[in-house]
């Protein structure tokens, strides 16, 4: 018997079938993956956090779900964050709102904070400054 050419209704791939297979209701899908995709009624979405494409069931979208591709992206989206600019090097970085409200989020790294601290706490601004004089005598081994 001659085979009949059909096209997958999901991906458009060409399928060749016997007439008996068509009478049995086959020939709509090229593979079980395409059949599952069509029957589960999934829709393509884009993650609101990372912009990655993913599939979600249509009834979940109707209920207001299906906005994020993973629990990790959902958790990251729940954290309120701010874009900040480092006071030392001018680099942009992200800090959480709760850290900024506590006075943090001024520096992009520990190195930049150390540069700031050394400039602020040197000389007379240092809490242990005693007028430039040491009250402890130098040991003999120090002078040589």
Image (cartoon, rainbow, N blue to C red):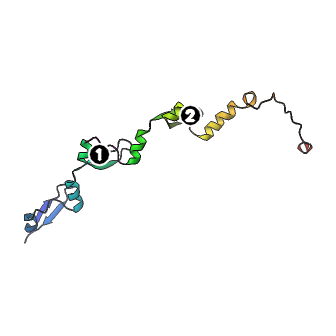
Q: Is residue 19 left or right of residue 126?
A: left
Q: Position of residue 63 (x, y in %)?
A: 26, 42
Q: Position of residue 15 (x, y in %)?
A: 16, 63
Q: Nearer the viewer, residue 45 or 91?
A: 45
Residue at 7% across, 67% down: 19
The residue carrying mark 2 is: 104
Packing grade of label 2 (10 A; few <14, some 14-19, many >=20) is few
Residue located farthest toward the front when viewing the structure as drawn: 63
At mark 2, the secondary structure is loop
Q: Nearer the viewer, residue 87 or 56?
A: 56
Residue 4 vertical placement versus 112 (above, below): below
Q: Quadrant of residue 86?
A: top right
Residue at 12% across, 66% down: 17
Residue at 7% across, 64% down: 23
Q: Quadrant of residue 31?
A: bottom left
The segment highlighted magenta reads: 63-69
Using the image, tell me which numbered label, if any, was put on residue 45.
Answer: 1
């Amino acid at each position: 018997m001659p085979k009949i050419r059909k096209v997958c209704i999901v991906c458009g791939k060409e399928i060749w079938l016997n007439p008996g297979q068509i009478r049995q209701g086959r020939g709509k899908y090229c593979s079980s993956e395409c059949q599952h995709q069509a029957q589960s009624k999934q829709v393509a979405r884009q993650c609101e956090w990372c912009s990655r494409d993913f599939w979600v069931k249509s009834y979940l979208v109707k209920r207001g779900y299906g906005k994020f591709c993973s629990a990790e992206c959902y958790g990251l989206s729940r954290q309120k964050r701010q874009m900040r600019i480092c006071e030392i090097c001018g680099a942009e970085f992200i800090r959480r709102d709760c850290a900024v409200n506590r006075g943090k989020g001024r520096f992009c790294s520990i190195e930049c904070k150390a540069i700031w601290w050394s400039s602020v706490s040197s000389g007379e601004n240092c809490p242990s400054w005693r007028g430039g004089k040491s009250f402890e005598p130098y040991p003999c081994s120090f002078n040589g």
